[in-house]
Image (tube, rainbow, N blue to C red):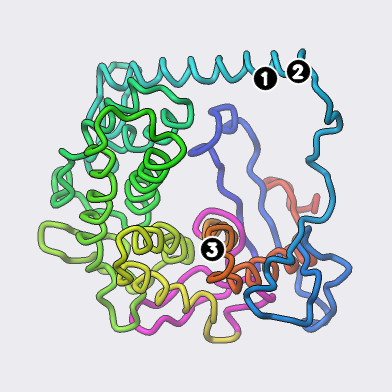
Amino acid sequence: MRVSTASLAAVCLPVALALPQHSHTYDQPSDQGSDLSSTRSPWSRENNNNNNDENHENYKFQGNKYANANNGNNSAAQQIAAQRAAAVKDAFQTAWSGYYQYAFPNDELLPVNNSFSNSRNGWGASAIDALTTATVMQIPAIVNEILAYVPNIDFSKSYQNEPVSLFETTIRYMGGLLAGYDLLKGPLNNLPNNTANVDACLTQAKTLADHLSFAFNSPSGIPHNNLFFNDNSFDNSTSNGLATIGTLVLEWTRLSDLTGDPSYASLTQRAENYLLNPQPATSEPFPGLVGTNVNISNGMFTDAEGGWSGGDDSFYEYLLKMYVYDSSRFGHYLDRWILAADSTIAHLTSHPSSRPDLT
């Protein structure tokens, strides 16, 4: 199994662009059934003989690698941390000010010429993405500017009829709206000046899901990714990707839990089941590690190549997130993540992309 890692520049500081890319290769094990206990992931079950969901509570993180070495009060360190937090907050406010002045409510600011673009269908991607950031930073002015916009988004049509990505729209718009709703209805409910606008976050998330739901109209329930809202059609793709399919279940399940309508979760969990129980067996060359492409008509994997890079990575990410979200319902997701992590530890080799001889 060979994969190449993609840059994380989309979510990291621009300096990440200067980092070299690496490729990773999974070495074929001499014995596919060999014991991996010597190369376990940091997560381990205290009682491996009981697989009931309730026993997932016994998972513990082994080791204190990230523990603070100084558990006492450290006023100097706290002062530095506060200064750094203030600098980050100031940078965010500066960025928001430029976007709000020159680009809002379009998707992105083009800072070189103070114009804008709409790569995410013209629904204000930067604004929705910034909602939870402004909320966590407790900046009421920005929070309420965004909230006032939320009820006015028209999710029934895309900017210039461009295709709508089920994957991108779910993680950016639906995720942003639901996270904002949860925070502003919960621990940070002092920030909004109009609770009706907070309620609109949930209403709009549901409206968006209703417009996206036709993506799952396939014989298998595997969704199409590239959608056209003007006529509820798809592109001509016959397969969909691991991450594209497997990075929906958290948002759609949360929407079901908040609205009391199980249909949203059912759509994504039906698709997820093909990934949790991959077929054919050859599409899982190592325990927990599966291929990348899935046939939309029958739910069968069409390859056995994949890994933790772009196109695959967030499937594994969501396995862990679903367990964190609700361990009683999604304990089996953690089991799959541990299998993948253990197989990776056992079989992954790495080298710079330009020097495969330096494995």
Asked whether the beta carbons under mark 2 and mark 1 sit within 8 Å of each other, the answer is: yes
Quarter containing the C terminus:
bottom right
Q: Which residue is mark 3?
A: 326
Judge whether 64 appears above or below 143 on screen.
below
Q: Which one is nearer the viewer's eye here, 125 or 30?
A: 125
Based on the displayed image, in which of its 4 quarters is residue 299 positioned?
bottom left
Identity of the amino acid at label 3? Asp
Q: Which mark is residue 260?
A: none
Residue at image position (59%, 32%) is 16
Magenta stretch: give its range: 282-311
Residue picked out by circle 1: 81
Percent across and percent down for residue 312 are 53, 60
- Tell me the kind of residue under disc 1: Ala
Q: 10 Å neighbourhood of mark 2: few (<14), some, or many (≥20)?
A: few
Check residue 287 for magenta coloring: yes
Element type at mark 3? loop
The type of residue carrying mark 2 is Ala
